[in-house]
């Protein structure tokens, strides 16, 4: 099935045809171009800021592109639209990715990305729901987003609203015990309007997950906690969109999409390099990276 | 003796009342709904009650998500678990996020009794009071509890209400109306002022009665809103009575006494004494025994008043 067909099928199954103001019928090619632009923004803005987290931003680019430019019903001109689908960034250090995405969608000017981490900027080092249009949750202390998403999903159910809730977790973040408290609760509350996506790039600050704190058998863990599990290549937009569509059909339980990704994806010297979790490219590296992303 | 009434029961019943009036009121608990008395709400509104099991960190952030979606969540458990166990969750997802979450905890202080130090919440006011934007309330009886809970439900922003385990004598009658952020003058007096919260308010009144027999005319303030504190009432007490004693079932550091000392030092320095738990953990025992052993009785307040007056 081609991506445009997926776009059409999502449209017809959607209860609300205002699902997005501008992004309902993009081709894969167009979305790939957007993904590349997001990567360039991430490199440019973190390079300019002189600090930040490019690695885990780059790994989740396709996940977030698929959501904002195909899957989510949202209105950049009305960030508080009551029936919007919610995207909750739990791994708050991927803020550069979210900011770049929101800017490309039109939540605020693209120019503003250059103010990342500066005094009085709306673009805080980690997400701040109070100051940035389109940001649903203040994050940065890991492990809280899934719980927050449960609250949002429960409210939707209580209000008989049909919005869906998407929450992006880091794999390293799943070291946090609260993730598993929440995993238990989401299944207990039968939240089929909730989808967790794990950006499974295999690395955390101190190195590979398997060396720092083993998560395996990861998929089995989620399954044992009562979740519907989908595993995909997290850099293939088509596969991701299929997974999001499949999740819509799952009833009575939440879905987790384990998206296998590469930390630093798109920039040769950053790929699978844990140094670039919380380190930014210097001026020379920015130049090389942007060339690679042309 | 005035009638003794459960604050927890007042809380539970008020939640039901609120739930009937406002469909956006939702309640969460962490497997202690029989003790916190959120069980009343759960029975009446099962769809709007979420038992999160023994997972307090998860509970408070679920509450944040509900608040971000327009609900008015009340989350309850023992004071020793919230805020202590969930401090970072409350900091990030409620305080920093400026969300409309109401944390109402029970079993505050050493008056919990026999369960011992693991269950004595003696740091909670210090912890929660440190968070920007939080309003902190410690009611003195069941009537004030019901009143405060209603005001909190109707006021946007993060709130912490601390209740205690034992029934407390009523210090108010049914006409009382809780006034957020305002001290209540329980007794007039000009020789010294006792400022008390929670379980210590009735002890302060008893102390004031006894002191009067010794010719000491003691003002008693109930300070149900710990934060933001009623600075004007404190400054007035300092300037008119020249000496202040604080009384709380909490560690001396970071609670009522510390907050008031800051106001007094800044605006009108006068001698102060602090009736509170010193830098230690209490043990198992009956509530009355513990209050006696750790210096939280009317008699301790009387002695503190004598000491503070000598320093004038």
Image (cartoon, rainbow, N blue to C red):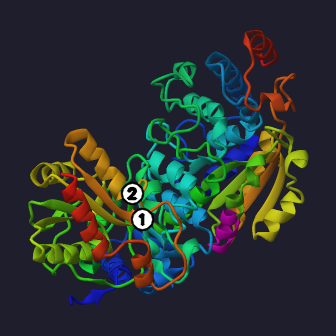
x 30%, y 87%: residue: B5
x 27%, y 53%: residue: B272
Q: Are marks 2 and 1 on the same chain?
A: yes
Q: Which residue is mark 2?
A: B255
Question: Which structural element holds mark 2?
Answer: loop
Q: Nearer the viewer, residue A265 or A19?
A: A265
Q: Residues within 10 Å of mark 1 (few under 14, many from 20)?
A: many
Report the quarter where the N terminus of chain B lies. bottom left
Whether tag 2 and tag 1 are in contact, CB under 8 A, the answer is yes
x 52%, y 22%: residue: A118
x 17%, y 50%: residue: B238
Q: Nearer the viewer, residue A109 or B306?
A: B306
Establish if A203 lies above or below B70.
above
Establish if B131 lies above or below A250.
above
What predominant SS class does the magenta segment belong to? helix
Q: Chain of mark 1?
A: B
Q: Position of residue B41 (x, y in %)?
A: 42, 81
Q: Nearer the viewer, residue B93 or B165?
A: B165
Establish if B233 lies above or below B1.
above
| In magenta stretch: residue A292 | no
Q: Which residue is mark 1?
A: B250
Question: Which structural element holds mark 1?
Answer: strand
Q: Nearer the viewer, residue A289 or B156?
A: B156
Establish if A166 lies above or below B249.
above
């Amino acid at each position: 099935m081609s991506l445009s067909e997926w776009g059409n099928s999502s449209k017809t199954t959607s209860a609300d045809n205002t699902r997005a103001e501008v992004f309902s019928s993009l081709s894969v090619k167009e979305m790939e171009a957007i993904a590349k632009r997001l990567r360039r923004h991430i490199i440019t803005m973190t390079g300019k800021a002189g600090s930040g987290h490019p690695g885990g931003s780059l790994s989740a680019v396709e996940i977030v592109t698929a959501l904002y430019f195909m899957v989510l019903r949202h209105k950049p001109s009305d960030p508080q639209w009551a029936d919007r689908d919610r995207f909750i960034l739990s791994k708050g250090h991927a803020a550069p990715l979210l900011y770049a995405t929101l800017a490309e969608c039109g939540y605020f000017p693209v120019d503003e990305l250059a103010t990342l981490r500066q005094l009085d900027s709306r673009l805080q080092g980690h997400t701040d729901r109070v100051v940035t249009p389109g940001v649903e949750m203040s994050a940065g202390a890991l492990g809280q987003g899934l719980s927050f998403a449960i609250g949002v999903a429960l409210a939707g159910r209580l209000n008989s609203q049909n919005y869906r809730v998407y929450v992006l977790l880091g794999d390293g973040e799943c070291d946090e015990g609260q993730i598993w408290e929440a995993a238990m609760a989401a299944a207990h509350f039968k939240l089929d309007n909730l989808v967790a996506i794990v950006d499974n790039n295999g690395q955390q600050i101190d190195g590979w997950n398997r060396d720092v704190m083993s998560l395996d058998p990861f998929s089995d863990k989620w399954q044992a906690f009562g979740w519907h599990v989908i595993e995909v290549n997290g850099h293939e937009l088509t596969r991701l969109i299929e997974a999001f569509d499949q999740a819509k059909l799952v009833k009575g339980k939440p879905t987790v999409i384990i998206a296998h990704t590469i930390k630093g994806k798109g920039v040769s010297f950053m790929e699978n390099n844990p140094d670039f979790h919380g380190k930014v490219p210097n001026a020379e590296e920015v130049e090389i990276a942007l060339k690679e992303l042309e | 003796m005035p009638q003794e009434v459960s604050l927890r029961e007042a809380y539970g019943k008020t939640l039901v009342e609120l739930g009937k009036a406002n469909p956006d009121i939702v309640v969460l608990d962490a497997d202690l709904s029989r003790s916190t008395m959120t069980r009343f709400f759960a029975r009446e509104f099962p769809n709007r009650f979420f038992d999160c099991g023994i997972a307090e960190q998860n509970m408070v952030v679920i509450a944040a998500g509900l608040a971000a979606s327009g609900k008015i969540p009340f989350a309850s458990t023992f004071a020793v678990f919230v805020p202590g166990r969930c401090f970072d969750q409350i900091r990030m997802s409620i305080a920093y996020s400026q969300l409309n979450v109401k944390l109402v905890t029970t079993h505050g202080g050493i008056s919990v009794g026999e369960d011992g130090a693991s269950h004595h919440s003696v740091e909670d006011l210090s912890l929660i009071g440190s968070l920007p934007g939080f309003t902190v309330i410690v009611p003195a009886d069941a009537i004030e509890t019901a009143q405060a809970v209603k005001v909190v439900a109707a006021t946007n922003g993060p709130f912490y209400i601390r209740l205690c385990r034992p029934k407390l004598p009523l210090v108010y009658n049914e006409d009382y109306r809780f006034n957020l952020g305002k001290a209540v003058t329980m007794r007039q007096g000009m020789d010294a002022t006792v400022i008390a919260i929670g379980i210590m308010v009735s002890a302060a009144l008893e102390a004031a009665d006894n002191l009067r027999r010794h010719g000491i005319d003691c003002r008693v303030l109930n300070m149900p809103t710990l934060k933001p504190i009623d600075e004007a009432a404190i400054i007035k007490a300092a300037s008119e009575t020249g000496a202040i004693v604080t009384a709380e079932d909490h560690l001396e550091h970071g609670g009522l006494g510390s907050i008031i000392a800051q106001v007094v030092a800044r605006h009108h320095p006068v001698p102060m004494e602090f009736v509170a738990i010193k830098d230690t953990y209490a043990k198992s025992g009956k509530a009355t025994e513990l209050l006696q052993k750790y210096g939280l009785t009317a008699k301790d307040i009387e002695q503190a008043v004598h000491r503070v007056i000598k320093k004038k």
